[in-house]
Amino acid sequence: MKIAAFGGAGYIGSHTVRELMDRGHTLAVFDNLSSGLRGNLQPGAEFIHGDILQPTQVLEFLQKFQPEGVIHLAAFKAAGESMTNPEKYSTNNITGSLNLLNACAATGVKYFVFSSSAATYGAPQYLPMDEKHPTNPENYYGYTKLAIEQYLKWYDQLKSIKYAALRYFNAAGYDVQGRLNGLEQKPANLLPVVMECAAGMRASMQVFGNDYPTPDGTGVRDYIHVNDLAIGHALAFEKLASTQQSFIVNLGVNSGLSVLDVIKAAEKVSGRKVNYQIVARRAGDPAEVVADPRLAKEMLGWEAKHSDLQTLVETTWKAYLANGVVR
Ligand code: WQD
C-alpha cells in the first residue's frame, strides 16, 4: 500500500515509517521539521518539507503521491504547554488535522491511522483503562486529540474514510536494531530527561512528587516501546484494509513503572548517577495511568514485545551514546 506519513520525521513517526517499509509498504513523509529531524528520514521514502497548516501544500502532495493510506502523527504534544498556549494547539493540532482530512476526502484516501493519546481519558476512574473508560481530558492537548477523533467519526460516515485512532500511553525507548536514534531537543518526558542527567547533559532533574498512593510514592505510567507502537500502526492498516471498519484501540502494556523505577534502571544501565530533587506534584498529574490493551490483542493480534524496563532504558541509553553526547 502507498502510505503518506504526516509527521514521519518525528520520534514515533520515523519508527513507524521504518516498520511500514520493512513490511513492504511504499512511504512518503510530509513533515515541517518543527520537531522532526532530517536524520530520522529513511532512504527509500520520499520526503516533502511541508506544513499541514498550508492546505494547498497538503492537497498537492496527496494529489501527486495518491496514497491509499495516511498516518497522522503531526501534532504538538506537551500537555503543560497546551494549557498556557491553547491557540498553538488549536491551530496546529485541530486546524492542521482538518486541512489533512479535507485533502484526504478530496483525493480518495481510504485509510487514516491517527496517533491519538491516553490523554483523551483524563484522570483514571478505574485501572487498567480500557477503551470504554470515560473521556474527560484534563489538558487541552488531550482535548485536541479527542476532538480529532470526533471529526474522524464524521469523515468516516460522510466521506467513507476508514480510520484507526490509536491511543498511545507513554511512548519510550529507541529502535532495538539501532537504526534510529534522533534525540528530542529540550525534552519534557521522563525517559529523555533521566537520560540527559545520566549523560551529564543536565546536572539534575526534578521528581514531581513522591507522596502519591503508589509503591514508592512516585508517579506510575504505562511505558510502551516505540517499536511496539510502530508495529501497532502497521497492524492497524492491515486491519482497516481487511475489514473496512473503523476502530479505536489503546496501545499500552498493562503494567506500570514508577519514576524511581526508571531512574534506578538508568543508573544501572549507564553506570552513572542520576541526580534529582523531589519537588511538589505537577498539576494535572494522576498518580497512576495503566492501559488495558486487550482490545488491540483481540482485534490486531498486537502485544508489546519490547516494552520491558531494561529494553526501554538500554535502547534509550544507546541512542544517547550513538549521538556522542555522553560526557
Ligand atoms: C511521566 C511521569 C511525571 C518528567 C505525557 C502526556 C501524554 C503523553 C505522554 C502524548 C509522571 C514524571 C516527568 C520530569 C518527573 N504524550 N516526571 N520529572 O505526563 O505521563 O504524559 O506524555 O501522547 O499525553 O501527558 O508523561 O513523561 O511527562 O511524565 O517526575 O522531569 O514522570 O510526574 O509521573 P505523562 P511524562
Image (cartoon, rainbow, N blue to C red):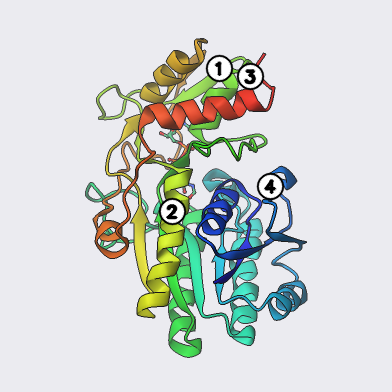
Q: Which residue is mark 3?
A: 202
Name the image quarter holding the N terminus.
bottom right
Q: Mark 4 or 3, which is nearer the eye?
A: 4
Label whose residue precedes the other's in the sequence (2 or 1): 1
Residue type highlighted by circle 4: Ser
Q: Which residue is mark 2?
A: 231
Residue type highlighted by circle 2: Ile
Element under disc 2 = helix
* Residue 96 in which image quadrant: bottom right
Residue type highlighted by circle 1: Ala
Q: Position of residue 214 (x, y in %)?
A: 26, 29
Name the image quarter holding the C terminus.
top right
For this view, does 324 lie left or right of residue 259?
right
Decide: is 294 above or below 186: below
Label whose residue precedes the other's in the sequence (4 or 1): 4
Q: Mark 3 or 2, which is nearer the eye?
A: 2
Q: Nearer the viewer, residue 75 or 315?
A: 315
> Among all residues in the image, which is located at the extreme bottom?
158
